[in-house]
Image (cartoon, rainbow, N blue to C red):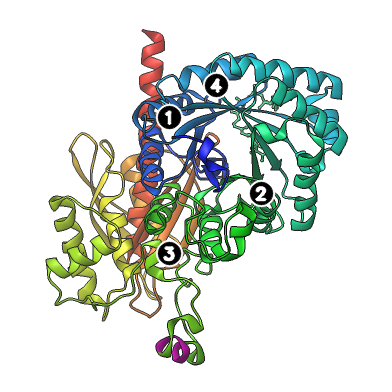
């Protein structure tokens, strides 16, 4: 994929698998990262930052696997982050060996607060390190990105010196991070203008922006940077990332699509040009967003722009009246443009497989026959309890019935709960263990959910700390499906699980066993590493 032909469009650099995964609780294993990477390639991102190769053996393996399996000659650039150290850069280069288009992204802080309190280095030391480490990265790959971390709080003259040194050492992309989400859009514009006017040879490289959402300005700042000449945006699906997250890919892409005529002149195009400003296949957005939410366990708030459950919902009568008369009275983009067609066929308990399969295909889900049958059977069970099945219900069912199949783990056979104000909440659970044994146990609890968890813990015997239990109604109505998200903590690692059901207690049981299975799989992997080390 050629970067040269991007002067008149935006390069989408997706960092969901690196900065996005830094979100507390969003830990992904190699198979989950690979599934997301394949979907990002289908979405059409230009660059996938697959991880931070030196961070852990798992991160190294993820970057290596994605480089080999997604980094094809006609595929995206595959990138690894590295500190400005020889070891980090060497490890990143090793992990990226299998990529047709590898990129090493090296960074070092340049703000005085970081130099004084974290790096404990002088400006001249950082300047020298920048030159040396960018050149070192260049000795491994042609495509080198450099980031002056905390750039927006860096004294401008020093920032310009550092960027000049990075370009002179071979950087091909200069990325400007607003690392702590401190900038306003006007300040961002001035920062980019200052760089373009004061850094020698800046026109030879691709100028990139990386924003954080601490003040809720990540997307606005990224768009301001584009208006001032930036041609690459670092962003994540659903905006997940460190602290309050990053600029959301779907917001950047749809802003450039919906307001194309506003942005065209910034790219030297005529106002009415209809050529897309990114390579993104927007019909893949919804499916990608759902996959990332499911695998990270990071729920999407209903009012999230573009992909939230309410983003295309019209509740108030005046809006409904307007949309019925003319969609664009209250809609600036079509649900179908992100892969979420309006619900034309009302699906319910009398629907057949064809209607069910058709709707799933319209929603972008391609299931095997076995997966379709499993999902259809679950659909019928739920439809018996609900009057009408919405697209959100279907998506929740597909997510549950097809979520990354755990090769090894515990499977729930049966959940039975007694509760109410005249009895002690009691749960009876039957599970199948990883080695095929069927076991049943029961427990009382402070409530039905606690009783379920106690009974499951008595069966699986894997110590853990429940740190989050959240319930989200998939749709409105008393018969709504509810999605339970669980987060467990074990020796500093966080494991999440999700499940949906019209019975919240049943959903809680399945969400918990999904999280426990992730922990079980982690422990099994640790055992095999120890066995390998012990020979
Ligand atoms: C803004 C961002 O998102 S940056 C990316 C953040 N992502 C991560 O941190 C990924 C996960 N991190 C990790 O796995 C670990 O921090 C590692 C493997 C990177 C480093 O682990 P450790 O060697 O134990 O170092 P630790 O994390 O304690 O401290 C970071 C060290 O790197 C140094 N450092 C930080 N950034 C840089 C940099 N860009 N270049 C060089 N050194 C750096 C710090 O000064 C500190 O050094 P010190 O221990 O001599 O004081
Ligand atoms: C590594 C850089 C780009 C980063 O994530 C930040 O500064 O926020």
Counting residues from the start of the chain, the first of labels 3 and 4 encountered is 4
Quadrant where the image shows the N terminus: top left
In three-dimensional space, the C-alpha distance between marks 1 and 2, rounded to whole angstroms, equals 24 Å
Counting residues from the start of the chain, the first of labels 3 and 1 encountered is 1
Q: Mark 2 — residue?
A: 212
The reply to whether callout 1 and callout 4 are in contact (CB within 8 Å) is no
Q: Mark 1 — residue?
A: 62
Q: Write the residue at 61% across / 65% down.
A: 262
Counting residues from the start of the chain, the first of labels 4 and 2 encountered is 4
Q: Write the residue at 55% across / 21% down.
A: 142
Q: Mark 3 — residue?
A: 447
Counting residues from the start of the chain, the first of labels 1 and 4 encountered is 1
Secondary structure of the residue carrying tag 4 is loop
Secondary structure of the residue carrying tag 2 is loop
User: Where in the figure is residue 20, as x and y percent of width and height?
Assistant: 54, 44
In three-dimensional space, the C-alpha distance between marks 1 and 4, rounded to whole angstroms, equals 22 Å
- The residue range painted magenta reads 320-324
Quadrant where the image shows the C terminus: top left
Q: Where ligand 1 lies, by quadrant?
A: top right
Q: Mark 4 — residue?
A: 142
Instruction: Tell whether 456 sits left or right of 438.
Output: right
């Amino acid at each position: 994929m050629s970067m040269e032909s991007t002067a008149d469009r935006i390069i989408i650099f997706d960092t969901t698998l690196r900065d996005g995964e830094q979100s507390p609780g969003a830990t992904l294993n190699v198979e989950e990262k690979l599934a997301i990477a394949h979907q990002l390639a289908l979405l059409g991102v230009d660059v996938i930052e697959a991880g931070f190769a030196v961070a852990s053996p798992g991160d190294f393996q993820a970057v290596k696997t994605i480089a080999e399996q997604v980094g094809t000659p006609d595929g995206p650039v595959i990138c690894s982050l590295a500190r400005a150290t020889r070891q980090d850069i060497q490890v990143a280069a090793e992990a990226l060996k299998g990529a047709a288009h590898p990129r090493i992204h090296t960074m070092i802080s340049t703000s005085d607060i970081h130099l004084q309190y974290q790096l404990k280095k002088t400006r001249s030391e950082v300047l020298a390190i920048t030159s040396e480490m960018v050149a070192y990265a260049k000795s491994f790959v042609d495509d080198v990105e450099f980031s002056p971390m905390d750039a927006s709080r860096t004294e401008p003259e020093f920032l310009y010196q550092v960027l000049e040194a990075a370009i002179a050492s071979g950087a091909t992309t200069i990325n400007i991070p607003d690392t702590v989400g401190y900038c306003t859009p006007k300040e961002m514009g001035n920062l980019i203008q200052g760089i373009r006017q004061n850094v020698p040879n800046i026109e030879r490289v691709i100028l990139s922006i990386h924003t954080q959402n601490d003040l809720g300005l990540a997307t606005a700042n990224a768009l301001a940077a584009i208006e001032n000449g930036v041609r690459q945006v670092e962003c994540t699906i659903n905006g997940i990332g460190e602290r309050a997250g990053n600029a959301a890919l779907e917001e950047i892409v749809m802003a450039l699509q919906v307001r194309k005529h506003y942005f065209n002149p910034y790219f030297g195009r005529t106002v009415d040009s209809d050529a897309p400003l990114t390579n993104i296949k927007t019909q893949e957005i919804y499916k990608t967003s759902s996959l990332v939410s499911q695998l990270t366990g990071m729920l999407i708030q209903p009012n999230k722009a573009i992909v939230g459950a309410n983003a295309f919902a019209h509740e108030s009568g005046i809006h409904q009246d307007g949309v019925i008369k003319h969609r664009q009275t209250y809609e600036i983009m079509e649900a179908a443009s992100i892969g979420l067609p309006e619900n034309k066929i009302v699906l319910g308990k009398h629907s057949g497989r064809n209607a069910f399969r058709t709707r799933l295909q319209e929603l972008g889900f391609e299931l095997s026959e076995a997966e379709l049958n499993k999902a259809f059977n679950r659909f019928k069970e739920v439809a018996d309890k609900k009057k009408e099945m919405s697209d959100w219900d279907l998506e929740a069912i597909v997510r549950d019935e097809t979520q990354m199949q755990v090769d090894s783990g515990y499977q729930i056979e049966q959940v039975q709960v007694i509760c109410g104000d005249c009895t002690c909440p009691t749960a009876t659970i039957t599970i199948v263990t990883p080695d095929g044994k069927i076991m049943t146990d029961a427990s009382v609890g402070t409530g039905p959910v606690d009783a379920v968890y106690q009974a499951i813990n008595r069966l699986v015997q894997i110590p853990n700390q429940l740190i989050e239990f959240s319930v989200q109604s998939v749709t409105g109505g008393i018969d709504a499906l509810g999605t339970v998200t669980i987060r467990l903590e074990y020796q500093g690692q966080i494991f999440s699980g999700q499940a949906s059901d019209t019975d919240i207690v049943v959903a809680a049981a399945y969400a918990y066993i999904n999280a426990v299975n992730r922990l079980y799989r982690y422990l099994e992997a640790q055992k095999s590493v120890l066995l390998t080390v012990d020979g």
